[in-house]
Image (cartoon, rainbow, N blue to C red):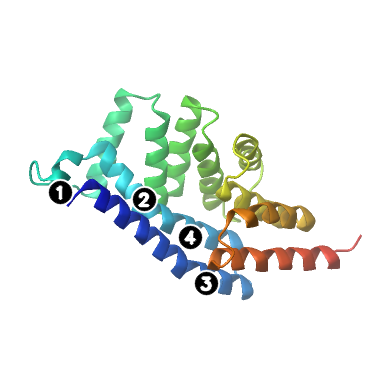
């Protein structure tokens, strides 16, 4: 099989996972469960296949996919160890640290993910993926799952650099909602809407969240 096959398969798996999990997220919100936790589940599920493919590209042996030699099996732990060894030799490889952070995120190791994204930001302070990833991981580390402080600053900075970052818009809206800034949250999510397929479950979920924010804003005491 070719490398293209594996990348396409990973993309298809990511889409399938997103389509399966977003309805669960929506139902969880309707039943009053914390919104941030469900958003992280979707993000991790999407990153899982894509991150695995990227990790293999970086530390695996892509030439084996073309039939040059038998593929070498590698566990996730071995792949992480190999990537860590590579990063020890190249500590300024921001993309490598981002990939490590994504890998830790999919393994639900939020503290390690945050540390990896922090290393990426030290190598490249304007790396949008690292900025958003750090904010996401920090929320998972916190018992209350709030997005504030440095995480909030990183999200606003990421959007200044990449205004159409869907993950940054979604997370910033969550942060504003948590702060009871419902009007701001709705406005942020409305910026996200045009970037989504209007017929997708994700778009419908965002629309429901906007409606909830509008309702909370209307009922909030002046």
Disc 2 marks which residue?
50
Residue drawn at the location 21% of the way across and 40% of the way down: 60
- Upstream in sequence: badge 4 or badge 2: 4
Viewer-proximal residue among 88 and 170: 170
Please tell me whether mark 1 or mark 3 is closer to you in this view.
Answer: 3
Disc 4 marks which residue?
42
Residue 73's mark?
1
Element class at badge 4: helix
Q: Residues within 10 Å of mark 3 (few under 14, many from 20)?
A: some
Q: Residues within 10 Å of mark 1 (few under 14, many from 20)?
A: few
**Inter-mark Cα distance, 1 to 2:** 18 Å
Residue drawn at the location 15% of the way across and 49% of the way down: 73
Relative to 58, is 208 above or below? below
Element class at badge 2: helix
Labels 4 and 2 touching (C-beta < 8 A): no
**Inter-mark Cα distance, 4 to 1:** 28 Å
Element class at badge 3: helix
């Amino acid at each position: 099989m070719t490398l293209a096959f594996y990348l396409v398969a990973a993309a298809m798996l990511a889409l399938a996972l997103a389509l399966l999990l977003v309805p669960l997220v929506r139902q969880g919100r309707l039943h009053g469960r914390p919104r941030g936790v469900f958003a992280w589940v979707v993000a991790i599920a999407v990153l899982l296949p894509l991150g695995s493919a990227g990790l293999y590209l970086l530390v695996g042996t892509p030439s084996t996919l073309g039939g040059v030699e038998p593929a070498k099996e590698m566990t996730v732990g071995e792949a992480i160890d190999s990537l860590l060894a590579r990063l020890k030799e190249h500590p300024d490889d921001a993309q490598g640290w981002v990939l490590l952070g994504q890998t830790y995120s999919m393994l639900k190791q939020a503290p390690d993910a945050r540390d990896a994204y922090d290393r990426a930001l030290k190598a490249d302070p304007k790396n949008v993926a690292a900025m958003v990833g750090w904010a996401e991981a920090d929320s998972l580390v916190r018992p209350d799952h709030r997005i504030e402080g440095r995480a909030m600053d990183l999200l606003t900075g990421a959007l200044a650099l990449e205004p159409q970052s869907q993950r940054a818009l979604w997370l910033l809206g969550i942060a504003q909602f948590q702060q009871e800034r419902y009007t701001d949250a709705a406005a942020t999510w409305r910026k996200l809407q045009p970037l989504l397929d209007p017929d997708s479950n994700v778009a419908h979920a965002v629309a429901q969240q906007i409606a909830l924010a509008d309702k909370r804003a209307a009922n909030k005491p002046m």
